Amino acid sequence: MPLLQSADWPLLIDLYFFLAGLAGGAFVIAAIADLLGGERNRSVVRVGYYLALLAVIPCPIFLIVDLGVPSRFLHMLMSLKPDQAIGAAAINIGQFHIKPFSPMNMGAWALLGFSALAFLAALSVFLEDAKRGRDLSAFRATVGIIGGFFGFFLAAYPGVLLGATARPLFQNGSFLGALFLAVGASSGAAAIALILSFLGQGAGGTLGQLRQIIIPALLLQAATLALFLLRVGMSGGEGAAQSLALLLSGPYSLIFWVGAVAVGLVVPFVLQIVTRQPGLVAISAVLILVGGFLVKYVIIAAGQVVLS
Amino acid sequence: MARTVAMFTDVSLCIGCRACQVACKQWNQLPAEEPEWTGTYQNHANFTDKSYRLVRFFEQKDDKGGLQWNLMSDVCKHCAEAGCLEACPTGAIYRTQYGTVNINQDICNGCRYCVSACPFGVVAFNHDTGRASKCTFCNDRLHNGLGPACAKACPTESIQFGFRDELAAKARKRVEELKKMGYKNAQLYGEDQNGPLGGLNAFFLLLDKPSGYGLPVKPRLPQNNVFVDSLLSIGSALLVGIGAIVAFRERGGKE
Ligand code: SF4
Ligand code: SF4
């Protein structure tokens, strides 16, 4: 067994990954709804963009609090460093640095870009609502397209980040980024649906449209999760089987099977298919959010256990 | 760039005295730690933020069913392709002109990515300073032509320091000698610059297979995954995007 150590990222980081995914997912959905008919899909656009902004606001705070030296959070993007080799394909522009193979560095840039665009999108919705007849749709289309790419990136990069470690569970899985992106989409859509049904704005087929996103997103979530487990299981990597056992049959198996799979994926999926009753649809949305958080939490927790 | 330096650790000469571990602590002013019971003479179980050098004691069954002691003085490998360095988002970890890998304590912000990214479990997080730390090959001594403290202290020359090319030649000769003496499992680990991680600047002569010393057989650069994992994520993104477009497309008549 190779002797490895672990960053031991705490719950705060899981929460960040979850919120970042949700924000990215909600933004992308709002952007697509906006581009395909901003007037018709007004409620989804409004809720999606507001939600993306609200969800991303705590993100940098969580990240900064978790740092060993929080006052140095800006070092993620820039630092006064001597002119030395800091990694493959690293780009230095003045004090700024971009490291394409360091997903944490790229993620910090994406978070910055996404936050700015989420703010602009929400602001434009707000300004339109504030004054009848004001039309900012052209501006918002640009923001939506660029921000959509950032949103995708923000949802997926934490999985790629984990994959680029030496932790056996993460390193051998390949599909963590794809899985996290699917979770971002399902939780983003579920959160929008939940808010719309609370506001009583689910009419006009809007909830049906969201269901059309939620169902395939949950399928994608299930498929990427299965592929991830399969890849780890078949990798033959050192320590991979042992960490997989922690997840599937060990101390984390209850949270995984009951929380992330049964309650967080299968039950809400079935509910989405069989019922349109508002109460049950809302419950299903809540379960999707719970499941989306738990699947990230439990994989990260099991993967960070130091094997001996 | 100056000539690449290296550390060659020949475990066949190690007597487990831990002079290297003590010398490292003294030179780098690393405070004492509570000892821990690991089941063998080894202390600690792994590198810590206050132990950059660690003599490992592996107890194995030998061919005749007796006890075989695999001793190995372990240290940061200063990999030619270093997972810690590639992972670091702040640029704190850098390659020195000697080819070694250092953590600039003035830049590290304590994100701990490097701790998870090292294929050998070397980097440790210092909770007092909030920064990551590891062996520097005694960078300050290097700059003054002294060589690392551990290599200076080693009484059996199990740890040798020098230019990489010279040491590698020496190591290859030594492994042949040992094989002739009957150590049929004698092998070099990390000496090959075409091998895993582009070769290690701290390489080893082992008397047993790598797993007998807790070393990964084929250490991988974690960042090699970035490309494929990103492509799969893009595939996932395309599916989500198409799903959303289908859901929100204009439907003739139905509204
Ligand atoms: S052994 Fe680990 S800490 Fe040392 S250079 Fe290689 S990756 Fe970095
Ligand atoms: S803990 Fe410090 S040295 Fe390690 S990756 Fe983060 S910033 Fe870099």
Image (spheres, coloured by chain):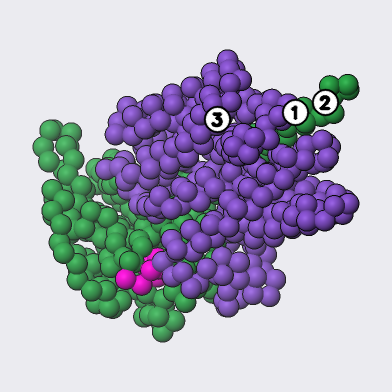
Chain colours: A purple, B green
- Chain letter of mark 3 equals A
Residue B131 lies in the magenta-colored region: yes
Magenta range? B128-136
Q: Give neighbour class at mark 1: few <14, some 14-19, many 20+ (Cα, 10 Å).
A: few
Residue position for label 1: A204
Residue A40 placed where, x, y %? 82, 35
Please say if the residues under marks 3 and 2 sit with CB atoms less than 8 Å apart: no
Q: Nearer the viewer, residue A306 or A65?
A: A65
Q: Give neighbour class at mark 3: few <14, some 14-19, many 20+ (Cα, 10 Å).
A: many
Amino acid under disc 1: Gly
Answer with mark 1 or mark 3, whichever residue precedes in sequence.
1
Same chain for labels 3 and 2? Say yes or no: no
Q: Nearer the viewer, residue B139 or A227?
A: A227
Query: How far separated are the C-alphas under marks 3 and 2?
Result: 23 Å
* Secondary structure found at label 3: helix
Q: Give neighbour class at mark 2: few <14, some 14-19, many 20+ (Cα, 10 Å).
A: few
Residue position for label 3: A282
The residue located at (78%, 52%) in the rendering is: A129
Relative side of A179 to B146, left or right? right
Relative side of A200 to A284, left or right? right
Q: Nearer the viewer, residue A287 or A60?
A: A287
Pointer 2 residue Cβ closer than 8 Å to ligand 2: no
Please say if the residues under marks 2 and 1 sit with CB atoms less than 8 Å apart: yes
Checking the image for residue B97, the label placed there is: none
Q: Is residue A194 above or below residue A269?
A: below
Name the magenta segment's main secondary structure: loop
Residue A134 placed where, x, y %? 87, 54
Checking the image for residue B255, the label placed there is: 2
Amino acid under disc 2: Glu
